[in-house]
């Protein structure tokens, strides 16, 4: 019979057993050389229950704009990696809708509305739908802890993410607008207005998306709300308003993307009324500020539970 | 059941610890700065509310995740929180980092009241949480740099510190890879790197070495130790790895169901069970309970599958070894070990629920 049983009598107090378990050379810091970091840089001393205790100076706070830039850059890079296929989906969806609508609308005002609506729909897809999903999942998985334990202004996190998602929509929106203009023989002359429409509609929709994602009690609900928001943007933005029932027209007026759609649609016309365009954009900007403010508040609320 | 009623962990002034390395280091803060407490926690209590069941899904009762916790962490110390899954370690550190509001109690870090000003925590400490979702889709390099920027560094410093930390941890070769595409241990190390960019006097690390190989673990402890030697950085470490606790910690608080059931240096804790030895028996298939000596041992064994773990006095252990290595029991025996007690035994002796001891891994 072979000796299967082996006895290993170990002594864990033995010094060498330590290095055997975890090869590690931890230095012994003599008390004298430990720099009194907090005191050296001019911190105060307070009387507390436990006697005199140093009050350390706080580390620096990240300032709004640099932090916003850092978040923007990081978000754009992760969006680039993970979201390019989704951008294609968004663009194809909008182009597909325009192709379908070609048989339905009879040129003129309706064609302008369809092209403008489809273009802004790309923004809604990414900024509203995807951002709601992102923040919903980040919150549910504890990912917000990372930002919440960094001295970064809440607005920087929300605005940086919103700006990244909004700028991510630029290529898709541009392609949709150009393809649509060609498809419906609309002038390309004033497409430069997209420079204003994308950021303003983007701000409004991204703020809404971020707020939905951060406020939804569960991530599935955030996804659902984002998709509902996008469906609303699709139905209310793309279908020509004159054919909609009055109640639905009111709903249309409440949707932040509507004003971007209107502004863009007007510029396809023969002689755009720039005053109205500006007014629409101003409303868009106002809604954008409001929705980003709500999103920032929602972030603050979600970060500390 | 000696430590059962103790729920606090304050600097022991009179206790003479074992001659181990850890207890020498533990005196750094005490002697050097006159009991320089970096983090003082008093009566910290948090209860997760009960969730009422929906249709089909049963509700959950309320959970008191931390219960009157009292600890003092001194400057330059590596202080550990040890406990099985669900003991309340994460809940405790989330309250220290300002992420969660306690129901009751106070947290003071470097003189700042964190319960009243949770936003200050971010400017005093760096936190490595158990989750990495915020960074998953970034490259290692961008994750570290962005975190540095958000910790208030300017662009140039953030880049320089990023490079230095990645180099220090041996991550330079992985710098361009997204965290998502790394192995579990590599990802954990990358997250640890982000915690080091933008120096902080207090590091709160929730299971930093989970899934790491010995090389990566050594990189982590090396980096921690350098910061401690150079800047007297204080570390709060959450772990349920007993070996890690024994080797790297200066002091450890043992948490069980939200309460601190003991707190001392690892060597000091082990003294509580110094008169005992631990006998581990591994049976080939099952224990031969028909052998009377074996049947008698069963009552005192913590069983996990084929493995029995017993705490015995040296005489009892000798008798038990004789019994299982001679006669009928030997045929059923696969392996046995006799060892001086570890923190695991301390945990048992302190009255930690026997079932949850299995949550303490030895690796
Ligand atoms: N969000 C929550 N809602 C309700 N109960 C919770 C929540 N988070 C944790 N708990 C409960 O609180 C207790 C402590 O959990 P905690 O996460 O602090 O444990 P832990 O010691 O960190 O465990 P682990 O070693 O697994 O990380 C557990 O019983 C857990 O089920
Ligand atoms: Mg935990």
Image (cartoon, rainbow, N blue to C red):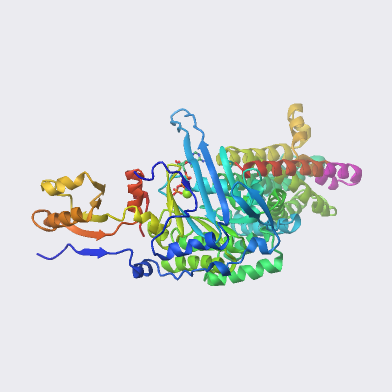
Q: Quadrant of the C terminus of chain B?
A: bottom left
Q: Is residue A163 above or below residue B55?
A: below
Closer-to-camera residue (A253/B5) = B5
Front residue of A27 and A291: A27
* Horizontal side of residue A47 vs A278, given as left or right: left
**Does residue A196 belong to the magenta stretch?**
no
Q: Give the residue at x 60% y 56%.
A: B125
- Residue B91: x and y, percent? 51, 45
Dominant SS of magenta comes to helix
x and y percentages locating residue A124 in the rendered image: 69, 45
x and y percentages locating residue A115 in the rendered image: 75, 46
Q: Quadrant of residue A227?
A: top right
> In the rendered image of this protein, does residue B53 appear above or below residue A271?
above
Magenta residues span A262-282
Image-based side of A152 in relation to B353, left or right: right
Tell which of A292 and A14 is nearer to you: A14
Is residue A102 in view? no
On-image quarter of the N terminus of chain B: top left
Q: Is residue B161 left or right of residue B216?
A: right
Residue A21 figure quarter: bottom left
Q: How many marks?
A: 0
Q: Position of residue A154 (x, y in %)?
A: 69, 48
Residue A304 shows in the view = yes
């Amino acid at each position: 019979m072979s000796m299967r049983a082996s006895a290993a009598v170990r002594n864990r107090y033995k010094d060498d057993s330590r290095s055997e378990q975890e090869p590690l050379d931890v230095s012994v810091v003599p008390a004298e050389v430990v720099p009194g970091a907090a005191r050296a840089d001019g911190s105060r001393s307070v009387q507390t229950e436990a006697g005199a205790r140093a009050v350390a100076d706080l580390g620096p706070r990240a300032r709004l704009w640099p932090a916003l830039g850092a978040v923007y850059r990081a978000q754009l890079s992760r969006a680039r990696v993970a979201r390019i296929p989704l951008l294609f989906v968004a663009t194809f969806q909008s182009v597909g809708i325009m192709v379908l609508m070609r048989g339905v609308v009879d040129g003129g005002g309706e064609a302008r509305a369809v092209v403008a609506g489809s273009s802004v729909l790309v923004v809604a897809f990414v900024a509203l739908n995807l951002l709601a999903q992102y923040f919903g999942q980040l919150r549910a998985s504890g990912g917000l802890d990372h930002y919440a334990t960094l001295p970064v202004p809440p607005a920087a996190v929300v605005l940086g993410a919103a700006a990244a998602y909004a700028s991510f929509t630029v290529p898709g929106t541009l392609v949709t607008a150009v393809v649509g203009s060609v498809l419906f023989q609309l002038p390309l002359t004033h497409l430069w207005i997209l420079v204003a429409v994308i950021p303003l509609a983007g701000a409004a929709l991204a703020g809404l998306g971020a707020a939905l994602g951060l406020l939804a009690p569960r991530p599935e609900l955030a996804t659902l709300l984002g998709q509902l928001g996008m469906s609303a943007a699709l139905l209310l933005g793309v279908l020509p308003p004159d054919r909609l029932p009055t109640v639905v027209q009111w709903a249309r007026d409440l949707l932040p993307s509507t004003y971007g759609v209107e502004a863009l649609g007007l510029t396809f016309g023969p002689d755009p009324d720039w005053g109205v365009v500006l007014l629409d954009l101003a409303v868009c900007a106002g809604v954008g500020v409001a929705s980003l403010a709500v999103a920032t508040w929602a972030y603050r609320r979600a970060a500390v539970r | 059941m000696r430590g059962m009623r103790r729920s606090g962990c304050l600097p022991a002034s009179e206790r003479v610890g074992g001659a181990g390395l850890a207890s020498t280091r533990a005196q750094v803060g005490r002697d050097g700065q006159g009991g320089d407490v970096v983090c003082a926690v008093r009566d910290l209590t948090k209860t997760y509310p009960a969730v009422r069941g929906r249709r089909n899904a049963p509700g959950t009762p309320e959970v008191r995740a931390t219960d009157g916790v009292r600890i003092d962490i001194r400057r330059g110390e590596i202080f550990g929180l040890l406990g099985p899954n669900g003991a309340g370690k994460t809940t405790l550190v989330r309250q220290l980092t300002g992420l969660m509001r306690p129901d009751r109690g106070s947290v003071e870090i470097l003189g700042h009241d964190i319960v009243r000003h949770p936003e200050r925590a971010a400017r005093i400490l760096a936190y490595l949480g158990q989750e990495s979702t915020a960074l998953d889709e970034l490259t290692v390099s961008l994750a570290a740099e962005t975190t540095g920027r958000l910790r208030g560094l300017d662009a140039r410093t953030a880049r320089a510190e990023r490079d230095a930390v990645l180099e220090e941890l041996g991550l330079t070769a992985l710098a361009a890879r997204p965290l998502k595409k790394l192995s579990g241990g590599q990802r954990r190390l990358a997250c640890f790197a982000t915690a080091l960019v933008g120096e902080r006097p207090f590091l709160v690390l929730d299971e930093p070495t989970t899934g790491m190989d010995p090389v990566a673990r050594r990189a982590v402890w090396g980096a921690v130790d350098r910061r401690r030697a150079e800047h007297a950085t204080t570390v709060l470490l959450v772990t349920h790895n007993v070996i890690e606790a024994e080797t790297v910690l200066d002091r450890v608080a043992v948490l069980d169901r939200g309460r601190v059931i003991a707190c001392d240096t690892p060597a000091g804790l082990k003294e509580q069970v110094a008169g005992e030895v631990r006998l581990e028996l591994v049976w080939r298939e099952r224990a031969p309970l028909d052998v009377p000596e074996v049947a008698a041992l069963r009552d005192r064994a913590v069983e996990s599958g084929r493995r029995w773990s017993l705490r015995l006095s040296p005489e009892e252990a000798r008798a038990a070894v004789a019994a299982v290595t001679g006669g009928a029991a030997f045929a059923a025996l696969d392996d046995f070990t006799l060892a001086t007690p570890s923190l695991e035994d301390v945990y048992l002796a302190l009255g930690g629920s026997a079932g949850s001891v299995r949550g303490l891994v030895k690796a």
